[in-house]
Image: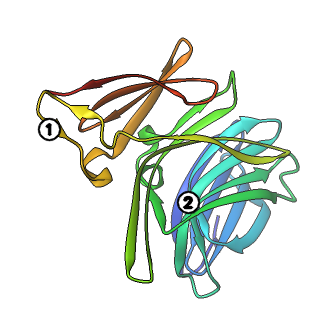
C-alpha cells in the first residue's frame, strides 16, 4: 500500500481480523484502515486526520479502539499524554469520539505495550503516567498510574495509584515521585497490583482505594 503518511513516521499498527489500523504522525495524526482480506492486494479503505497521535491501539469491543499517545498542536508540538476512543465500526468512516489529556505528561505505554492494562470484565484501563508542569516558578511532578474507563459514552477517570511516601524497606522513605514510577499493573481477583522500583501496591479493583503495600528491601 503506497502513499500512507508521506514524510511521516509510523507510530502504531494494530491487526484485528482482516483489518490493519495504522497511525502515522508528523503534524497531524492520520489513522488509516487497511483491508487485508486479499493478502496480495491490500487496500486503504478508511482514513481519519486529527491533531496528535496514538502510539498504541487496543480494541475494547463494540467497534471501538482505544488509543494511547500524545495530544499535539497544529505545528506538531506534543502537549501531553492523551487517551482517545475511536469508533471504527464503519471502516470506511472512522471517527474519534472522545479524548482525555494529561497535560505535560508521558506514558510508558507509548513505547512499551507491556505497561498497558485493559480489564474487559470491568472496563478498567490502567496507564502509568508521568506529568511535569511549572507555574509561577513552582514545579510539580506526578508519577504513578491512572485508572480510566472508556467507551462509546465517554472517558472517565476512576482514580490514581502512587507509590510515593510508601515505606520502602526498613529505613528508606520514598521522598520523590520519580523514585517510585510505576511500570506494570495486573489484576488478580478483586485487586489491582502495581509494581515500581520501590515495591508492590494492592488496590481495590472497583475504585482503586489502597489495600496493602509491600516494599522491596
Residue at the bottom extreme, as displayed: 75
Q: Is residue 115 left or right of residue 23?
A: left
61 with respect to 7 (left or right): right
Kindly identify the residue that appears in the image at 60 percent across and 37 percent down: 125
Task: Choose between 174 and 190: the one closer to the eye.
Answer: 174
Q: Position of residue 195 (x, y in %)?
A: 34, 32
Q: Give the number of the disc on residue 172.
A: 1
The answer to whether residue 38 is seen in the rendering is no
| Residue 62 appears in view | yes
Q: Which residue is the extreme one toward the top?
A: 189
Between residue 79 and residue 32, name the one nearer to us: 79
Q: Are marks 2 and 1 in contact (CB under 8 Å)?
A: no
Q: Is residue 91 above or below residue 215?
A: below
Q: Judge left or right: residue 21 versus residue 186.
A: right
- For mark 1, give the secondary structure: strand
Query: CA gap, disc 2 to disc 1?
Result: 34 Å
Which mark identifies residue 69? Answer: 2
Local secondary structure at mark 2: strand
- The residue lying at 74 percent from left, 72 percent from top is 49
Position of 53 relative to 189 (above/below): below
- Across and down, in percent, residue 186 comes to 46, 26
Q: Nearer the viewer, mark 2 or mark 1?
A: 1
Amino acid at each position: 500500500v503506497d502513499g500512507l503518511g508521506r514524510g511521516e513516521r509510523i507510530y502504531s499498527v494494530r491487526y484485528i481480523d482482516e483489518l490493519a489500523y495504522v497511525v502515522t504522525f508528523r503534524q497531524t495524526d492520520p489513522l488509516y484502515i487497511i483491508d487485508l482480506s486479499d493478502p496480495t492486494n491490500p487496500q486503504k479503505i478508511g482514513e481519519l486526520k486529527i491533531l496528535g497521535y496514538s502510539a498504541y491501539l487496543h480494541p475494547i469491543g463494540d467497534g471501538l479502539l482505544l488509543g494511547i499517545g500524545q495530544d499535539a498542536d497544529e505545528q506538531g508540538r506534543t502537549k501531553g499524554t492523551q487517551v482517545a476512543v475511536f469508533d471504527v465500526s464503519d471502516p470506511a468512516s472512522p471517527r474519534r469520539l472522545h479524548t482525555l489529556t494529561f497535560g505535560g505528561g508521558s506514558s510508558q505505554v507509548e513505547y512499551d505495550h507491556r505497561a498497558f492494562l485493559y480489564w474487559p470484565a470491568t472496563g478498567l484501563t490502567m496507564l502509568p503516567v508521568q506529568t511535569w508542569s511549572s507555574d509561577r516558578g513552582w514545579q510539580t511532578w506526578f508519577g504513578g498510574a491512572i485508572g480510566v474507563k472508556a467507551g462509546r459514552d465517554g472517558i472517565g477517570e476512576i482514580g490514581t495509584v502512587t507509590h510515593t511516601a510508601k515505606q520502602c524497606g526498613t529505613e528508606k522513605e520514598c521522598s520523590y515521585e520519580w523514585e517510585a514510577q510505576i511500570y506494570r499493573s495486573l489484576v488478580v481477583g478483586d485487586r489491582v497490583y502495581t509494581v515500581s522500583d520501590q515495591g508492590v501496591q494492592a488496590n481495590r479493583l472497583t475504585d482503586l482505594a489502597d489495600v496493602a503495600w509491600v516494599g522491596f528491601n
